[in-house]
Amino acid sequence: MTGSNHARAPRLFVTADLGPGAEAAFDEGQAHYLRHVLRLEGGAPLLLFNGRDGEWRATLAHQGKRGAAAHVAAQTRAQIASPDVWLLFAPIKRTPADFIAQKATELGVSALMPVITRRTIVSRVNDVRMKANAIEAAEQCERLDVPACHAAQDLMDVLGGFPADRMLVFADEAGVDDGAAKPLAAALAPHHGQKRWALLIGPEGGFEPAERDAIRALKQAVPVTLGPRILRADTAALAGLALLQANCGDWV
Amino acid sequence: MTGSNHARAPRLFVTADLGPGAEAAFDEGQAHYLRHVLRLEGGAPLLLFNGRDGEWRATLAHQGKRGAAAHVAAQTRAQIASPDVWLLFAPIKRTPADFIAQKATELGVSALMPVITRRTIVSRVNDVRMKANAIEAAEQCERLDVPACHAAQDLMDVLGGFPADRMLVFADEAGVDDGAAKPLAAALAPHHGQKRWALLIGPEGGFEPAERDAIRALKQAVPVTLGPRILRADTAALAGLALLQANCGDWV
């Protein structure tokens, strides 16, 4: 898998506007990476994206001892929107948010939202680091945008303000017993036309009953199962995102 | 996700036969784990499985200074077979086989088969370690068996002896351009009745043309795509397994 990466121009996310003749400044970390890690000469070909203007061919221009910018030439791809899928996940100790941020970005989420639940052991998430991981993954997987990275929020607060027009898929272990939760693919079937999605993955140990009641009370909630084995939270997140994209996203 | 793990009896894979009144010896590593990591007293409740006899309740018996065994009491679950899905993966440097072994076990593969391709950089896989990871994941995810763990084989050898009655799903980047590869879920639709599957994930850099031709020459081959982004090999393996289970495996 993962296509041929041989001799492809480095692909970087920038914040500057991109257009013919534009100059896009790199931040200090990028300048260091281009100069000292990749050891690129001035004039080296690059690909740039900013989440708004598509992807552009550009050439590197070193500036002084530490700076660097790019001269933007021609557009290589027009901007397209990623599917609108949020990942709400309870951060866990053994699986750093780094990993989830990388994989979920590859799998095309539009937003990464850590949620603190009652059984969540980790109480803070390094959002700067989560963003850096999402950017790196976006650069490598050829996305044209970077998912929004939110600070951790309390699950109950998220549920309280949950948008009426967004489906909330959640892995509902307890729903297996009372028959409410269906296999994900089957559960999605009546909703294929929906465009706004969220996948909620609980912590190791699952949701507390009051949390589960609050989730299920939302009319947007879709309780699902992910097979007969007990999945770790990160496996469940990845599997759930793959199934969402394959059924209602951009893998169709 | 991942159910409630609170105060559940430790669950261990053993090689001994399991039946009422049987005594199952633990290996040295397990005995050490039970005694010094979990600090269990003799008589502590355990759950055992061996891939043949289902799951059994048992109690711990320390033996001498280092040994341990279990007295087997009653069956808690009858044996069921895992879906028959092989994962053929090109080992890669950045993603240790550990990770793939763990996640693929959770996702229910029946066999882990490292394959060496022409662009594979890693030429050996630690199969003892792969097996240990598969066992640990099987214990935690409540499987009743452990996937078979094969030594690394050359891709061309695997293809040469590939079983006629097993479908071979492979992520075919090049197939996107000539229209041969379809989205995985759609590609599986005509084959839902099939019971034997394999998922083949190539190395970073993809298959060489001769390899791709050899794969496609098999009538069992099903070329598929996994969306518009470039997935890392491990992400592709996990996503592909999730979709296989959801469409033709035990998540239906």
Image (spheres, coloured by chain):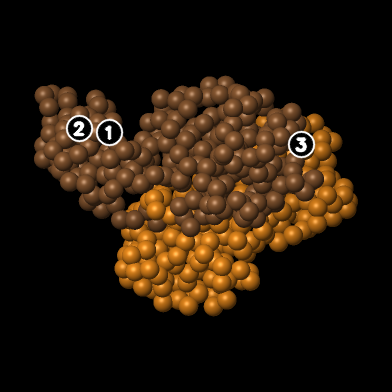
Chain colours: A orange, B brown
Pointer 2 residue: B24
Pointer 3 residue: A8
Please tell me whether mark 3 or mark 2 is closer to you in this view.
2
- CB within 8 Å, label 3 to label 1: no
Please tell me whether mark 3 or mark 1 is closer to you in this view.
1
Where residue A125 sits in the image (x, y, percent)?
46, 53
Relative to A151, say whether B103 is above or below.
above
The quadrant holding residue B58 is top left
**How far apart are the two marked residues, 3 and 1, measured between alpha carbons?**
49 Å
Relative to A152, say whether B188 is above or below.
above
Q: B192 and B6: which one is in front?
A: B192
Pointer 1 residue: B14
Q: Secondary structure at mark 2?
A: strand
Mark 3 and mark 2 on one chain? no
Where residue B140 sits in the image (x, y, percent)?
34, 44
Relative to B67, say whether A151 is above or below.
below
- CB within 8 Å, label 2 to label 1: yes
